[in-house]
């Protein structure tokens, strides 16, 4: 395990998913521990109800229309809110020159599937339909997220393809939750890693799927999709010491075999959620890699002012 990540574990409150109320308190405490002061005058943000609560980030010195990333936070479908990914979304807007729309979708088990997914998809449709108001190029919209949010992003990309929805051009999948069957070597091997383990995964799927538990629909568990053709280009990040590792690697390989342009990044010696631990160099490198992937996916148009700085 990366030594800086191991050192950081000492100050992290455990977040189990057996009890959703306790899990949410623990997640808020974890976010407080990991959060850094934010004072970035290169981008601003505003909160809106559309009617799903969203936070819209915009670079301050970029000419539009801009590309947009609809982003979904992690938290096992049970925990999390707009604060989870505030620093990341602000960074993406400032460094990659994007409008970032972060979505505060409903949480399970009070709102099991399809409620969180419906919120995610509705927000994506809203961004496309209101592109002019947002200063967004409707032909340059992508989706992304980490963990449960990555699973939502992958599901949204599938539904947009299947139902002639928004013409998405990119999906950023950061150690995404993809397969409710929990039958991969990494899921069997990593039963007690930090932050997220096999037991947590079992509780997560039980809470999220509700009556669908054991027979998840494709949009809830994108790994069950038989056909991945026609999906937007993808960036997939997998963590070595993560029960989700193998489902992420296999999904990326399936995308590649299908002909979907896919960048796969596997990071050794790291646990699930590692890139939120910004005191570790490996986390900062991973975040820089995500920024770089967004820049490649959404290069600035000629004549527009780019806010990219590295």
Image (cartoon, rainbow, N blue to C red):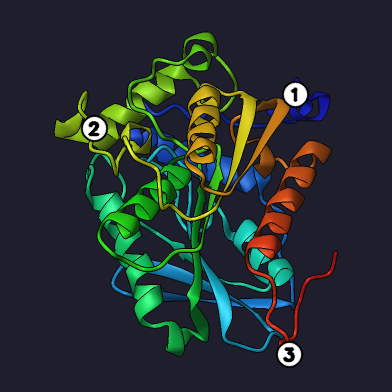
Q: From the viewer's perspective, tell me whether residue 211 is left or right of residue 246.
A: left
Q: Give the mark nearer the N terminus: 2 vs 1.
A: 1
Quadrant of residue 93 within the rendered picture? bottom right
| Vertical arrangement, residue 157 with respect to residue 113, above or below | below
Q: Position of residue 175 (x, y in %)?
A: 55, 37
The residue to which callout 1 is attached is 6
Quadrant of residue 227 within the rendered picture? top left
Res 303 label: 3
Give yes or no for contact between labels 2 and 1 (Cβ–Cβ under 8 Å). no
Q: Quadrant of the N terminus?
A: top right
The residue to which callout 2 is attached is 216
| Vertical arrangement, residue 62 with respect to residue 309, above or below | below
Q: Give the mark nearer the N terminus: 3 vs 2.
A: 2
Label 1 secondary element: helix
Q: From the viewer's perspective, tell me whether residue 63 is left or right of residue 256.
A: right
Label 3 secondary element: loop
| Vertical arrangement, residue 222 with respect to residue 66, above or below | above
Q: Give the mark nearer the N terminus: 1 vs 3.
A: 1
Q: Position of residue 96 (x, y in %)?
A: 70, 67
Identified at 58% across, 40% down, the residue is: 30
Q: Nearer the viewer, mark 3 or mark 2?
A: 3
Cα–Cα span, label 1 and label 3: 46 Å
């Amino acid at each position: 395990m990366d030594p800086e990540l191991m050192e950081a574990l000492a100050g992290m409150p455990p977040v189990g998913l057996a009890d959703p109320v306790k899990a949410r308190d623990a997640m808020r405490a974890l976010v407080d521990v990991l959060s850094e002061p934010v004072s970035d005058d290169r981008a601003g943000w505003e909160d809106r109800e559309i009617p799903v609560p969203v936070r819209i980030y915009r670079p301050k010195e970029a000419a539009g229309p801009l590309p947009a990333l609809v982003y979904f936070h992690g938290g096992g479908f049970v925990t999390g809110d707009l604060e989870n990914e505030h620093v990341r979304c602000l960074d993406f807007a400032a460094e990659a020159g994007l409008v970032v729309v972060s979505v505060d979708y409903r949480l399970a088990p009070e709102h099991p599937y399809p409620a969180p997914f419906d919120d995610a998809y509705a927000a994506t449709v809203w961004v496309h339909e209101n592109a002019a108001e947002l200063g967004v190029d409707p032909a340059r919209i992508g989706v992304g997220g980490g963990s449960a949010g990555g699973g939502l992003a992958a599901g949204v990309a599938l539904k947009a393809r299947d139902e002639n929805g928004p013409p998405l051009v990119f999906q950023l999948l950061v150690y995404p939750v993809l397969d409710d069957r929990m039958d991969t070597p990494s899921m069997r091997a990593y039963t007690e890693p930090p932050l997220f383990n096999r037991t947590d995964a079992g509780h997560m799927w039980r809470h999220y799927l509700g009556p669908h538990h054991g027979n998840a629909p494709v949009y809830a568990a994108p790994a069950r999709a038989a056909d991945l053709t026609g999906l937007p280009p993808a960036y997939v990040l997998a963590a070595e010491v993560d029960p989700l590792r193998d489902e992420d690697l296999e999904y990326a390989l399936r995308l590649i075999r299908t002909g979907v342009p896919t960048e796969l990044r596997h990071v050794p010696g790291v646990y699930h959620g590692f890139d939120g631990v910004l005191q570790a160099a490996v986390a900062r490198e991973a975040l820089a890699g995500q920024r770089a992937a967004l820049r490649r996916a959404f290069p600035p148009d000629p004549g527009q002012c780019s806010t990219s700085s590295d």
